[in-house]
Image (tube, rainbow, N blue to C red):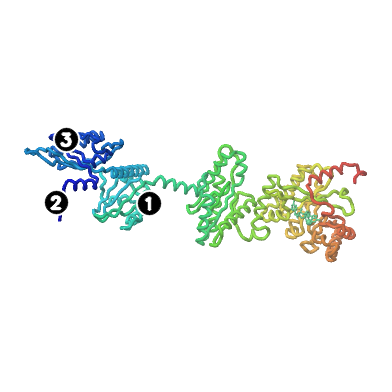
Amino acid sequence: MADRKNRNGEFWELALERAHLGVWDWDLASGDCFYSAMWLQMLGYGEGELVETSDLWLQLTHPDDRERAVASGERHIAGQTDSIETELRLKHKSGHWVWVLDRGGVVERDAGGRPVRLMGVQTDITKQKQAEHELEQVNVRFRLALAASGTGIWHHDLAARKSYWDERTREIFGLVADTDEVSSDLWHSYLHPDDRDYAERAHKVPLQTQKVVAVQYRIIKRDGEVRHIESLIRFIADAQSSGQILGTVRDITEAKQREQELAHAADHDALTGLLNRAAFDRLLAQHIATARPLAVFYVDLDYFKALNDFAGHAAGDLALKSVAEGILGCLPPSVHAARLGGDEFALLVPDCDAAQAERIAGAVLAAIRDADLGSTATSRKLAASIGIAFIADANTAVADALACADDACYAAKAAGRNRFAVFSPETTSGSGGLNAARLAADTVDAMEDGRLKLFGQEIHQLGKPWDENRHVEVLARLVGRNGRLIPPDEFIPAAERFGIASRLDRWIIRTALSLHGPALKSGALTLGFNLSAQTLSDPQLWDFVDAVIDETGAPHSGIGFEITETAAVTNFTAAEQFVRKARERRCRVSLDDFGAGMSSFEYLRRFPVDAIKIDGSFIEHIAESRFDREIVSAISGIAKSLGCSVVAEKIEEQDALDILRDMGVAFGQGFLLHRPEPLQAIVARASAQAALPVGRQA
Ligand code: C2E
Ligand code: CA
Ligand code: CA
């Protein structure tokens, strides 16, 4: 083992140099100060480059550090401290600052114990200082970020069972306290009872893992205010203790409210606050799936479009709001109401039977009648048509459930509005199904908006020009909303099924007579009107016809009516009366579609009609079918024996025309003779011909 005493100056120099330690040696008595080569080198100087005075270091010290550095030395010299230990910045030769840690102390004293020599070592700690500075910057930024996000920090020391809340955390909980330490059960006392279990469970984070748990819960502040909190929690291991739980808290009440508002907006109609279509569909799907009987109501406002046009959108909006309020106000709490769009509403009535549905429908109709339309539209009242569908099958599709209710709603509209109708599969299957009700409703609208048109087809005396008697059958045409011409075979059965056929016939009669009364009066032509079975049994029909004739000046003798064989048979008494009244007025009556019903010829004797029209189905193949020829021949024979004329329908071929003429059928109608065209054009032609001198008529 080497002797300590043998270590010479060279040894120490080497050691200091390797350790990068600079040495200074200060003789207090002489004031001389020695700075080692390493000391100088730390600052970029070579030996002899600086004048080594005792205050050389002080001259090189950063002005901000001087006072502190000097004080540290003085305290030590005065015997107040065991050593000098100070951090300071010294100026490097190239101008920048070098951080050093200076440690030293008295190494020699005089006989009186006064210090005469001081020595110290100096280490370059620039790198360490830089790291500290960077860490500090990170810390500052972190704190700023926390402050900006309004995040509070708390921790719970597991071993000490103590909790610490920072100022922000205390602020969030509304806790007035000056210190961080809080009792460990304080947090629990804030929890909303509904969220307590969940929040407490979430806070038992798995120990010894890095996992971060996120949890949202509500607290009740001491003043009773409920706030939503979000916490991130994790376990922090600690070598000295059993570790701690570290967490953040953030008040997310506003965000939650916005979230709830958005959710509400996504599900509700902005104008009325009722559920919107998407939400209603979802709700309906859920209810249907439970397989409990429910009713779907489809509510369509009547006259709303007119109100909107007449009184403006503001009035329309007001009316919709008022309707929504009225509907909500009259419903039991279990019923869900939605606005499907425009002026259409829907209700979902859980566990609904027929009696309850009827009560609710009545209440809704009343509420809509009472809706506030504002000052601009005082005289008019709103009404609604309601369709109700009962659903009990869990497999029903939402769209089908609504379509059924919608369909029933059309039926209610067709039946005259301001009423409700219940969907039943029987009334909507058969002719046209779902579309029939729609079509009937559309026909009603068409009468108002000019989409119902009058056409006509000439009836010819066979072998003679039309000009000699100028009789025309009036035919109705419906222009669909898409512009397509809908044939009467489609919309008339629908109109009959939904009880508007009578209205339709009256509309045709009134319109034709109003437009062409003068032509009829002048004898330019005669018109034949088709009547449905409903019209036939309408006791007020003749009052109506008489009134229209009075108004328009058209003579009774200028008009005739076509009643179908089937209608006549099924409404026998009504038909008899009708025919009697017609004869009193000298109106012509024809029995239409004769043969199609194949009823007994006996009926013919009971109806003293002017003409029978042989159904087109016997005429169209008459050239090829002997059977048809025999039937037509028989019918025409009986008709003649009864003194009524015979009209053959649907004459399309010259062959058929020739055969009919040979059989002695006097009148005919068909595409060969004339294709239906707008009545207006026919009347114009007839009027022009009637005006010509008799000899010039073509
Ligand atoms: P309908 O009374 O038998 O009228 C004759 C129908 O035969 C008309 O059909 C006419 O266009 C069509 N037709 C005439 N000649 C020919 C032909 O040569 N070939 C073919 N294939 N068809 C021909 P439209 O106009 O479609 O009327 C169908 C039915 O609708 C009418 O049968 C009538 O029952 C009913 N209808 C028409 N207008 C009215 C109305 O205003 N009120 C009522 N209640 N029913 C009407
Ligand atoms: Ca007819
Ligand atoms: Ca016919």
Q: Which residue in the structure is indicated by mark 2?
A: 4
Identify the amino acid type marked 3: Asp
Give the side of residue 82 with respect to residue 188, left or right: left
Q: Where is residue 667 shown, x and y percent of the image?
A: 86, 55
Amino acid carrying label 1: it is Gln
Which residue is farthest bottom? 627
Q: Secondary structure at mark 2?
A: helix
Residue 379 position (above or below residue 364):
above
In percent of width and height, residue 158 lies at: 26, 54
- Residue 78, image x and y in percent? 13, 37
Residue denoted by label 3: 32
- Which is in the foreground here, disc 2 or disc 1? 2
Binning the other alpha carbons within 10 Å of mark 2 as few (below 14), some (14 to 19) or many (20 upward) gives few
* Above-or-below relation of 80 to 400: above
Q: Nearer the viewer, residue 616 or 46?
A: 46
Quadrant of the image containing the N terminus: bottom left
Q: How many neighbours does mark 1 have within 10 angstroms: few (below 14), some (14-19), or many (20 or more)?
A: some
Q: Is mark 2 within 8 Å of ligand 1?
A: no
Disc 3 to disc 1: CB gap under 8 Å: no
Q: Which residue is mark 1?
A: 216
